[in-house]
Amino acid sequence: MKRKITKKFGDRVRELRSAREITQEGLAERSGLSRQYIGDIERGVRNISLINIEKLQRLLALAFLNFLISNDIS
């Protein structure tokens, strides 16, 4: 069964955040989003806006498409 897009996106955010050794708290502080909201994104329970996607993309210093695409194409 295919995973929900929100879960795939959350996994990608966690992957990128962890690779940069940033905590959820650190990402929340830098983005102006709450730690709970970041956790919800990573668990795939939030369907976040493009505005917040852009905030995270800029903080994790990736081109927009690289932010959205991972090696997992399932």
Image (cartoon, rainbow, N blue to C red):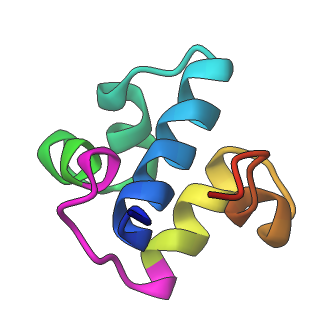
* Residue 42, above or below 18: below
* Residue 35, above or below 56: above
Determine the residue positioned at 79% across, 70% down. 64
Q: Quadrant of residue 16?
A: top right
x then y, percent, for residue 4: 36, 69
x then y, percent, for residue 17: 55, 31
50 relative position to 36: left or right:
right
In the picture, which quadrant includes the C terminus? bottom right
64 relative position to 52: left or right:
right
In the picture, which quadrant includes the N terminus? bottom left
The one nearer the camera, 8 or 74, is 74
Magenta segment = 41-51
x then y, percent, for residue 65: 82, 70
Determine the residue positioned at 83% across, 59% down. 66
Q: Quadrant of residue 28?
A: top left
31 relative position to 35: left or right:
right
